[in-house]
Image (cartoon, grey):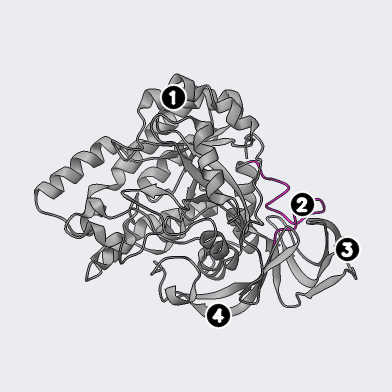
């Protein structure tokens, strides 16, 4: 065997046990005792789990007159340092473009840069009949998920008719529709009203997008999916108002799924009050909510109403990008970094603080993303035949998160000063060690495109 990981505690979504892992040609070929290989890693005292999968990122994405600051090289290196070994990025359709052209544009962004494996969702912003007819072709090419925006009026937002047609065609094709659920018409009116009143600071971003616009859009999207007989996945859920809609749908037996992100679990509205325009760091959509919403989200993860923790990694520099919104909160680029800090934060805040056990942790950050988005069992687990995407995690390693010590191409982290206990020390992708005790040992371009399978009910 090429590589053997010895003496580690293996953790999957269902099991915890001690064993060696044998790897050959990028695959796990044996799990047992006293294995031998050309290279050996002694993982005594370490937790060994499947690499994290982040199914919500925006690398090198043009948005609001600028572009997200991480490209497919810097963003994936940061991901690997944080224990993420695969991700699915959003390719965003421009008005008039085909879906094929959209995906090809994003593939070129990744070529020669990505250091971890990657797939693409395609975001439909111009749902013409010819575009909708492309959906089966996308599915055959391994692009088995689509995103629709009910927000960002005048740019990304789609109407209910287009939304319904995409749901119908996606169901026929075995694809999963994802939705950004905010009522864009209402948000547009509220933004204009606040600006007319001279209310321009970052806190008014929060005020322009109340929880009810997320709840209404979530309920509407679920109703449309039910009418189409299609599954639905709601991205970056933030609040009880929206989560209650998911709970009701799932209680009816509908195939409705949802994710949340670390920022919504750990931060709240008070961040928008930071002085010297500091609140702009947390301008994202939907915005941070209230403490009670955070409690509801943790409960939703525990009870299975939320299935995934992703990041919505969409970084913009505080100085030079976010500050374009000084004097007008509506011009602050929406988004924040998080691809590097997700695993350690959720282990610390979720497992060590008693919200859920370590198997549930693996389920939320790796296994469920793989299952919902057509990558299981090749990814998302440790089993014979699976890809050798593995994290060796030191449960005793303590770090204070600081932007200056991270690898994301951005000048801040929303989690500055957070203390985490438990951190990846080695990240293995396709059987190759690419993060080795704080050193990047991989090669830009080694990441492979993931041709994903069609949707199966979780």
SS type, badge 2: loop
| Residue placed under numbered mark 4 in the picture | 398
**Left or right: 27, with 335 as reference point:** right
The tag earlier along the polypeptide, 4 or 3, is 3
Q: Which mark is residue 386?
A: 2
Tell which tag, 4 or 3, sits nearer the viewer.
Answer: 3
Q: What residue is at 76 percent from the left and 77 percent from the top?
A: 44
Q: Quadrant of the N terminus?
A: bottom right
The tag earlier along the polypeptide, 2 or 3, is 3
Tell which tag, 2 or 3, sits nearer the viewer.
Answer: 3
Q: Residues within 10 Å of mark 1 (few under 14, many from 20)?
A: some
* Residue 366 placement: quadrant: bottom right
Boundaries of the magenta span: 374-391
Q: Is residue 114 visible?
A: yes
| Residue placed under numbered mark 1 in the picture | 164
The tag earlier along the polypeptide, 2 or 1, is 1
SS type, badge 1: helix
| Residue placed under numbered mark 3 in the picture | 1
Q: Residues within 10 Å of mark 4 (few under 14, many from 20)?
A: some
């Amino acid at each position: 065997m090429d590589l053997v990981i010895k003496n580690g505690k293996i953790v999957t979504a269902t099991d915890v046990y001690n064993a060696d892992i044998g790897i050959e040609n990028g695959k796990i070929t044996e799990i047992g005792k006293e294995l031998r290989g050309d290279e050996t890693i002694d993982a005594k005292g370490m937790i060994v789990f499947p690499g994290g999968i982040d199914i919500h990122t925006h690398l090198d994405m043009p948005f609001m007159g600028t572009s997200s600051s991480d490209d497919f090289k810097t963003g994936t290196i940061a991901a690997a340092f944080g224990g993420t070994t695969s991700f699915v990025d959003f390719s965003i359709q421009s008005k008039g473009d085909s879906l094929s052209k959209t995906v090809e544009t994003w593939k070129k962004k990744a070529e020669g840069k990505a250091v971890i494996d990657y797939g693409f969702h395609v975001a439909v912003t111009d749902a013409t009949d010819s575009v909708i007819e492309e959906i089966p072709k996308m599915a055959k090419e391994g692009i088995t998920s689509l995103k629709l925006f009910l927000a960002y009026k005048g740019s990304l937002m789609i109407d209910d008719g287009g939304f319904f047609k995409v749901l119908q065609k996606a169901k026929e094709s075995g694809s999963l529709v994802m939705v950004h659920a905010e009522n864009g018409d209402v948000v547009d009116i509220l933004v204009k009203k606040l600006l007319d009143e001279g209310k321009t600071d970052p806190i008014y971003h929060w005020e322009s997008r109340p929880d009810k616009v997320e709840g209404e859009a979530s309920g509407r999207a679920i109703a449309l999916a039910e009418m189409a007989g299609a599954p639905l996945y709601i991205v970056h859920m933030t609040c009880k108002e929206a989560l209650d809609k998911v709970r009701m749908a799932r209680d009816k037996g509908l195939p409705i799924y949802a994710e949340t992100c670390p920022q919504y679990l750990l931060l709240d509205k008070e961040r928008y009050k930071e002085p010297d325009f500091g609140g702009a760091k947390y301008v994202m959509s939907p915005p941070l909510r209230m403490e009670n919403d955070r409690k509801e989200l943790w409960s939703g993860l525990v009870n299975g109403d939320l299935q995934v923790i992703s990041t919505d990694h969409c970084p913009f520099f505080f100085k030079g990008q976010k500050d374009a919104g000084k004097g007008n909160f509506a011009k602050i680029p929406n988004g924040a970094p998080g691809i590097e800090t997700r695993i350690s934060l959720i282990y610390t805040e979720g497992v060590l603080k008693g919200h859920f056990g370590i198997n549930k942790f693996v389920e939320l950050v790796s296994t469920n993303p793989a299952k919902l988005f057509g990558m299981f069992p090749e990814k998302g687990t440790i089993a014979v035949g699976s890809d050798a995407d593995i994290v060796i995690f030191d449960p005793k390693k303590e770090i204070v998160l600081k932007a200056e010590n991270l690898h994301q191409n951005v000048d801040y982290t929303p989690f500055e000063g957070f203390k985490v206990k438990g951190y990846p020390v080695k990240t293995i992708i396709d059987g190759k060690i690419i993060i080795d005790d704080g050193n990047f040992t991989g090669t830009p371009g080694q990441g492979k495109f993931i041709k994903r399978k069609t949707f199966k009910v979780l």
